[in-house]
Image (cartoon, rainbow, N blue to C red):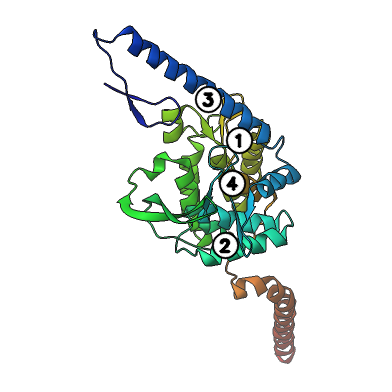
Amino acid sequence: MWENGLSSGYATRVVYGRSCSGLRLALVLSLLLCSSFSWIFLSVQASQSNPSSTSREDICSFIVSLYRDFGEFGCCVESPVVEPDVCYTSTNLLAEHVLRSICGKPGIANKIKRFLEKYSSSFYDYYQVLLGLNFSLPFTVVEHVVVDVVDSVRVVHVRRTETVIEDYYDYANLLVYKALLHIAQGEENEALKELTMLSEMFNGYGFADAYYRVHGKYETYKVALAVIAYRALGYASEVEKYRSVLEKINPLATLYEQGFKGTGDLNLETASLVLIALYGDLHEPVRKPEPRNEIASQLPVVMVVVFPSVVILITMLIKARRSRVSVTNTFQ
């Protein structure tokens, strides 16, 4: 029969039967024991490398620690434990932005910019909308494609496939990405429809979406995305609600459990989005200025100038009419 693996989520074949010998059973138990120790070791190692807080300084230092220099260019690997040998062009687009605009690290940002120029792509995952790069709907499944290997570090593109995600509304991140796209296009009411569905997933700890229902863990970056969307709309109470969740997660990690206990590694994607959520300037390019109605904007000034003149004119006409009536009565 087939069962889901405990850590990877991939299907793992488990054999049962009366012919299972003691040696085979001992081997299975040994493998399970080794897997448990490996998981514990990786969890401890990950928690030691994660930022101790959500401060700007701690998260920026974490991202800098992921940087790998290759001479003319450089990139940030995705995480210190789980993916220490992979540079995604998508998350390095985020890293280049936060290192330059939030962390004050233009030197590293310039090296990453050259990396992005060398390995340019037409798609940088759906969060590219944060940096002024819109995407087309409907949502489609993405795939990871290795385009190069530099000093044992894989360079990976995120590419869209033709497979449509019909149930996008079951995923908190896709709801926010669609809301952000509407915001970028000046469609605030449409954005609020997506965020209403998002709020229905929130249970006080995080978003209980399709991922949570399968894995039983919350994803930190989805909370960061909610903060970004509501900041762009100027909804202070919603911003504070989700911001407080981010600040409670300890240690800061890609995943967390009820009680806000961070578990496992922290990756570049999550760290960058948390920085943008808490410290980024969201006026541009996410929030476009609302179109001004020039006539409406000048209306108060027009009223102040014209209204008194109209009143004076009407008063003069009334007085003139009264004068004419008075003169007529006198001659009669």
CA–CA distance in space, label 4 to label 2: 16 Å
Q: Quadrant of the N terminus?
A: top left
- Name the spot of residue 221 as percent of width and height, x first: 56, 42
Secondary structure type for disc 1: loop
Kind of residue at disc 4:
Leu
According to the image, label 4 marks what residue? 268
Are the residues tagged 4 and 2 within 8 Å (C-beta)?
no
CA–CA distance in space, label 3 to label 1: 19 Å
Can you tell which of label 4 and label 2 is closer to the viewer?
A: 2
Secondary structure type for disc 2: helix
Is 182 in front, or is 313?
182
Label ID, residue 253: 1
First-in-chain label (4 vs 3): 3
According to the image, label 2 marks what residue? 115
CA–CA distance in space, label 2 to label 3: 34 Å
Are the residues tagged 1 and 2 within 8 Å (C-beta)?
no
First-in-chain label (4 vs 2): 2
CA–CA distance in space, label 4 to label 1: 10 Å
Secondary structure type for disc 3: helix
Q: In the figure, 30 relative to 289: above or below?
A: above
Can you tell which of label 3 and label 1 is closer to the viewer?
A: 3
In which quadrant of the rendered view does residue 169 lie?
top left
First-in-chain label (3 vs 1): 3
Kind of residue at disc 3:
Ser
Residue at image position (64%, 35%) is: 252
According to the image, label 3 marks what residue? 38
Q: Quadrant of the C terminus?
A: bottom right
